[in-house]
Amino acid sequence: MLALLAALALLVPAPQRPDTDGDFLAFAQTPRRPGNLVARTGVVGRSAEGRPIEGRQLGDPKWPGELLVFGCIHGDECGASAIEPTIGGCPDPSADIFIVPDLDPDGSAARSRLNAHGVDLNRNFNAGWRPAGEAGSAEYPGPRPFSEPETRLAARIVHALEPAATIWFHQYRGERPFVRAWGQSVAAGRRFATLARMPFRLIRWPAGTGPNWQNHRFAAPAFVVELPQGRLEPEMRGRLSEALVRMGRWVRED
């Protein structure tokens, strides 16, 4: 993990404000030894408008099979960004979980699905990407794949971390949460649905989405959890926290 974070430090674009240069280096260089639990937060990149994008690591770095979680990619669907996969408030010693709570802080600040350039980040990945609409329109995929700093950051994290599984959280207008996956990610998606006590749906990936790109580029599964809109109830937060911990154990044991 130390090598991963050092690599990310080199790959992440330079912050727009020089007084924050040390944030990520401090995060990357924090000493860690196998058997020592960590609960670390640091800046791993910047948004289009220069807002910090944070990363969190929870668990024991000795485990090779890591779980990666993107809590929010649309700025108006960030209910899962506050979920903490912990046990009694403490990291789980049987898992290593890496979290990006909010990949779209500009959209979150504007309460918008889109980033500051008017791009739907979850249509900006290089898997079935095709031009459509214009900046600011619904599901605008950007002028080209990976045109946005946020999606480039997500790709660098996935390449560097090589997670055993990735979960992308979304929120939709329905009332019942569910897990959706396709192809190679179906088994892992079904597993998480069981752990979270949610229905599972077999749904093809839309063009240009993060899971679509991951499922075409990597062997490890990547799937989506759709939650109802609004703030999550405490019961749902607790259920998802427990499910993420158990999923973190499952991927490193699988």
Image (cartoon, rainbow, N blue to C red):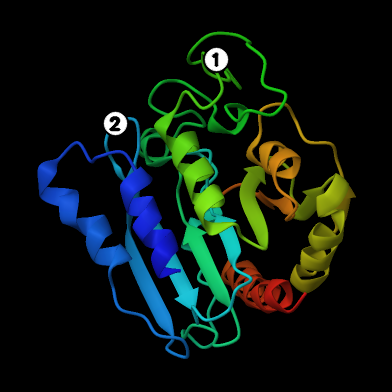
Q: Which of pointers 1 and 2 lies earlier in the amino acid sequence?
A: 2
| Residue labelled with disc 1 | 137
| Mark 2 nearby-residue class (10 Å; few <14, some 14–19, many ≥20) | few
Residue 132 coordinates in the image, percent (x, y):
63, 10
Residue 52 visible in rendering: yes
Residue 164 appears in which quarter of the rendering? bottom right
The answer to whether 198 appears left or right of 103 in the picture is: right
Q: Residue at x 63, y 39 (%)?
A: 210
Residue 247 appears in which quarter of the rendering? bottom right
Q: Residue at x 67, y 15 (%)?
A: 130
Q: Quadrant of the N terminus?
A: bottom left
| Mark 1 nearby-residue class (10 Å; few <14, some 14–19, many ≥20) | few
**In the depicted structure, whether residue 194 falls above or below residue 221:** below
**In the depicted structure, whether residue 129 falls above or below residue 195:** above
- Amino acid on which disc 2 is placed: Glu
**In the depicted structure, whether residue 56 falls above or below residue 137:** below
> For residue 43, which numbered disc appears in the image?
none
Viewer-proximal residue among 112 and 44: 44
Residue 96 coordinates in the image, percent (x, y):
55, 75
- Amino acid on which disc 1 is placed: Ser
Q: Residue at x 55, y 84 (%)?
A: 92
| Residue labelled with disc 2 | 49
Q: Are marks 1 and 2 in contact (CB under 8 Å)?
A: no
